[in-house]
Amino acid sequence: MIYLDNGATTFPKPASVIKAVNETLVKYGANPGRSGHRLSMKASEIMYECRLNAAKLFGIDSPENVIFTNNCTTALNTVIKGILKPGDHAVISSLEHNAVVRPLEKLKEAGVEYSVADYVPYDDENTIDNFRQAIKDNTKLVICTHASNVFGVKLPVERIAAMCRIYGILFCVDAAQTAGVVPISLKDTCIDFLCTAGHKGLYGPMGTGMLIINSNITPDSFIQGGTGSQSSNKSQPSILPDKYESGTPNLPGIAGLNAGIKFVLSRTPQKLENYEMKLAQRMFDMLSKMKNVILYTQRPDLKNSVPVISFNIKNLDSEDVASVLNDKYGIAVRAGLHCAPLAHQSFETENTGTVRAVMSAFLKYEQINYFSRAVNQIN
């Protein structure tokens, strides 16, 4: 099968990731941080090495500020629900995933408000101005996707972060679609919280994610329990990462994530982005020549986009197109609303959805050509 559903999770995974998961289950399958025996110590070393590599990748000096989560959604919920209190206000973009929208909708029941700042296609100045105008006296947090999971367009997160720092507002970035693909250095930005999946551009297993804290202000923890530290204290530890990592961690997943991060570090995000962008550009160019194919963005480029293509075929349902690609051509894509109805409203596709194809490091030009021929035949 030609796999183009990398926006949901990357596949295949590097051989090193599979090896790391297997070795953990076979050789080091003890509970990290809970015992002093050799296997438990080895498990703790694996987790710490992953924190070190994540800190290196994202440009932070404190590996303890790398918090392991189940996924990007858990990381986002930790920030949103741990920062915002009754009477607070938040600002989000018009491209946000339900991982941002639904927690905020839930918090509305407790008296938290939020506003939506419209993304203006390929116009950073007006996009930033929309964020500025959405800020209120009680705005405490701005949450913004780095790049749309549906259309691949980037938001100017570095400039939004700088604006938030001037206004004294905390800033959280959803990097689910950019971590590992786009170079990100927290040393060079005013981003306070970076949330990401471990199983997408970082090539780790599903069930992994990270919250990276780049602020002296930390969210409240909404899960409390055993951490292997300060066990005589009935209160949750305040030290990082223990504050957020109660219960037994997903050691096989974290070991695989560590191998995935090392894979990205060895290739470098810049080289991965360059290669995947060339694939996306070839796909866009081929689809743009087909009379009945609808494309919703400009030709993708490194400044404005990540390697994601969304399209439709006139008079055909997006999910029907995805089904035919799967059943007849052996091609995996995702269709529909992609858990991001706000983004579809922004691009006026909320009634149709789109077919989405997302690149990865393991795709070949020949596979892009085959995909394009399949779409043309359906067309």
Image (cartoon, helix red, strand yellow):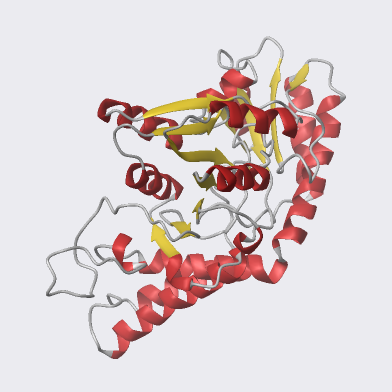
Q: Residue at x 68, y 41 (%)?
A: 156
Question: Is residue 29 something one can see in this rendering?
Answer: yes
Residue 53: percent from left, percent from top: 55, 72
Vertical side of 137 occupied by 216: above or below: below
Residue 21's quadrant in the figure? bottom left
- Side (left or right) of 104 relative to 327: left
- Side (left or right) of 289 relative to 251: right
Name the foreground residue: 354 vs 100: 100
Residue 195: percent from left, percent from top: 49, 51
Vertical side of 250 occupied by 83: above or below: above
Residue 294: percent from left, percent from top: 75, 19
Instruction: Name the image quarter holding the N terminus.
Output: top right
Residue 211: percent from left, percent from top: 45, 56
- Side (left or right) of 238 relative to 304: left
Instruction: Name the image quarter holding the C terminus.
Output: top right
- Side (left or right) of 238 relative to 296: left
Number of marks in picture: 0
Question: Is residue 27 something one can see in this rendering?
Answer: no
Q: Residue at x 31, y 39 (%)?
A: 85
Q: Residue at x 33, y 42 (%)?
A: 81
Name the foreground residue: 8 vs 119: 119
Q: Residue at x 70, y 43 (%)?
A: 306
Name the foreground residue: 317 vs 353: 353
